[in-house]
Image: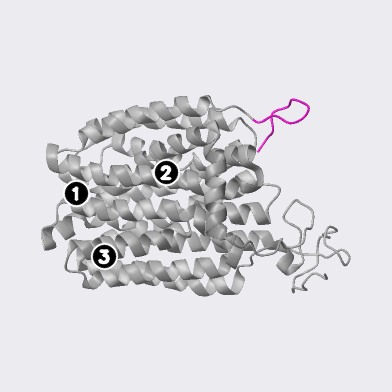
């Protein structure tokens, strides 16, 4: 097979592809990573919306926070359960096709919600359609791209792609908060739908499924032929789950990542804005604080990827979870009608820690499960979203029952301490000479 010719400015040879050396200004892997980054931003736009709409939906339809939280929990649960199947479907049908369909599903769900009149429609449009769409572009998507296109710099690329979700939050949270405040929740939902649709052409034109499609080796690796499509995607995802479930590290990773999801997407992303509003803070101010988390999330995640290439992933995770738990225990004391310096410090601190857990968790999946690591990580991500879904629902129920979110903050802080202990007991995989493998 001769590599596909692609126009580029010659500057550096790539001797690993058959047919002779070739020169490129920028390795195509970085272009694919950039498209992936933009795609995740577009798909993550919806994640900025639910926390802003608790009060508007409650005021217009009379739905309880528990009902609204249930719709968000369905979205999060399906997001997680879809991820491992999406990784297998990408092996079968290709990244471009799966992601284009997923973006369309997100847009359809967001648009359809404009005409909803009953709570079950909220659960169908937000929960099912958006959950399936965003789940197909979950972190298993970035794991698949990273595993195929990069041999070197995997930790760094994982951190950058993980930060894309935070970048979407940074872009869309203030915008959606302003739209909700000035024009109502329906225009904000339409904005999210358009954001998802705009990304589709970029995916179709610039994304490629495998380096061999353009005659290249993975960045930092050797040229390999593109493998044949893997049939039985769903069966493969289930088989990988059963194989991984027989091992202890899987349950430790899944359990700790469930707590990660509970303390981020399920708790802060869903309930921070309504909780701050309970204390008299304007929705736009609370949403801006959540957007600031996105700024420091990008910094923290990229830095975590750099650290993961250099240090023991288990110890990094333990530190991340312990610090997160301590910060949550102090949060009830910081809630006020105005934004004070202690709250700003919490936002910066929590932002740095938000998804810093992803690069070391993915590194441990690679270390433990090799070629199946993307699908295993998809199942670990499913547990993350199940944890998020439970807290998204139970947090709303607790607020309805107690009239405050305090008990939820304290419980989440205690769970983070448990997660720190769980990751420390994961045993490292060792090579034939007894040296611990570096992910």
Rendering coords of residue 425 (x, y %) = 53, 24
Mark 2 secondary-structure assignment: helix
Q: CA distance from mark 3 to mark 2?
A: 30 Å
Task: Kindly identify which residue carries mark 2.
Answer: 384
* Residue occupied by mark 3: 179
Indicate whether 139 appears above or below 102: above
Q: Quadrant of residue 267?
A: top left
Residue drawn at x 29%, y 42% as measured from the top left? 391
Quadrant of res 427: top right
**Residue at image point 63% right, 61% down:** 230
Q: What is the crowding at mark 1: few (fewer than 14 residues within 10 Å), some, or many (at least 20)?
A: many
Tag shown at residue 223 = none
Q: CA distance from mark 1 to mark 3?
A: 24 Å
Kindly identify the residue that appears in the image at 17 percent across and 60 percent down: 57
Mark 1 vs mark 3, foreground winner is 1
Label 3: few (<14), some (14–19) or many (≥20) C-alpha neighbours in 10 Å = some
Residue picked out by circle 1: 66
Magenta stretch bounds: 429-439
Could you tell me residue 366's position as x and y percent? 62, 42
Q: Earlier in the sequence, mark 1 or mark 3?
A: 1
In magenta stretch: residue 434: yes
């Amino acid at each position: 097979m001769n590599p596909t010719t692609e126009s580029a400015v010659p500057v550096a040879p790539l001797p690993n592809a058959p047919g002779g050396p070739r020169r490129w200004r920028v390795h195509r892997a970085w272009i694919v990573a950039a498209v992936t980054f933009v795609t995740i931003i577009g798909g993550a736009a919806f994640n900025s919306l639910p926390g802003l709409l608790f009060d508007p939906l409650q005021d217009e339809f009379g739905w309880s926070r528990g009902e609204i939280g249930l719709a968000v929990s369905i979205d999060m649960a399906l997001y997680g359960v879809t991820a491992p199947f999406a990784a297998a479907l990408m092996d079968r049908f290709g990244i471009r096709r799966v992601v284009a369909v997923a973006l369309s599903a997100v847009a359809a769900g967001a648009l359809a919600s404009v005409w909803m009149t009953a709570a079950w429609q909220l659960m169908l449009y937000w929960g099912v359609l958006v959950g399936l769409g965003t789940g197909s572009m979950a972190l298993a998507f970035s794991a698949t791209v990273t595993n195929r296109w990069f041999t070197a710099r995997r930790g760094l690329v994982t951190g950058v792609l993980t930060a894309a979700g935070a970048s979407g939050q940074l872009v869309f949270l203030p915008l959606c908060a302003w739209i909700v405040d000035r024009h109502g929740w329906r225009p904000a939902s339409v904005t999210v739908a358009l954001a998802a649709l705009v990304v589709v052409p970029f995916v179709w034109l610039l994304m490629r499924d495998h380096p061999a499609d353009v005659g290249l080796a993975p960045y930092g690796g050797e040229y390999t032929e593109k493998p044949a499509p893997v049939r039985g995607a769903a069966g493969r995802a289930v088989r990988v789950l059963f194989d991984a479930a027989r091992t202890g590290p899987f349950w430790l990773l899944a359990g700790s990542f469930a707590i990660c999801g509970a303390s981020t997407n399920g708790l802060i992303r869903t309930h921070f804005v309504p909780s701050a509003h309970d204390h008299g803070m304007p929705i736009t101010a609370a949403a801006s604080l959540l957007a600031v988390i996105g700024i420091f999330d990008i910094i923290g995640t990229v830095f975590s990827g750099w650290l993961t290439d250099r240090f023991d992933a288990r110890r990094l995770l333990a530190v991340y979870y312990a610090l997160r738990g301590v910060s949550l225990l102090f949060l009830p004391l910081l809630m006020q009608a105005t934004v004070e310096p202690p709250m700003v410090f919490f936002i910066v601190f929590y932002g740095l820690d938000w998804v810093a857990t992803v690069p070391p968790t993915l590194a441990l999946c690679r270390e433990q499960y090799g070629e199946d690591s993307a699908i295993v990580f998809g199942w670990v991500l499913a547990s993350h979203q199940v944890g998020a879904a439970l807290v998204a629902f139970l947090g709303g129920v607790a607020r309805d029952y107690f009239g405050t979110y305090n008990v939820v903050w304290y419980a989440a802080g205690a769970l983070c301490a448990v997660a720190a202990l769980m990751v420390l007991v994961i045993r490292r995989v060792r090579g034939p000479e007894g040296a611990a493998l570096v992910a």
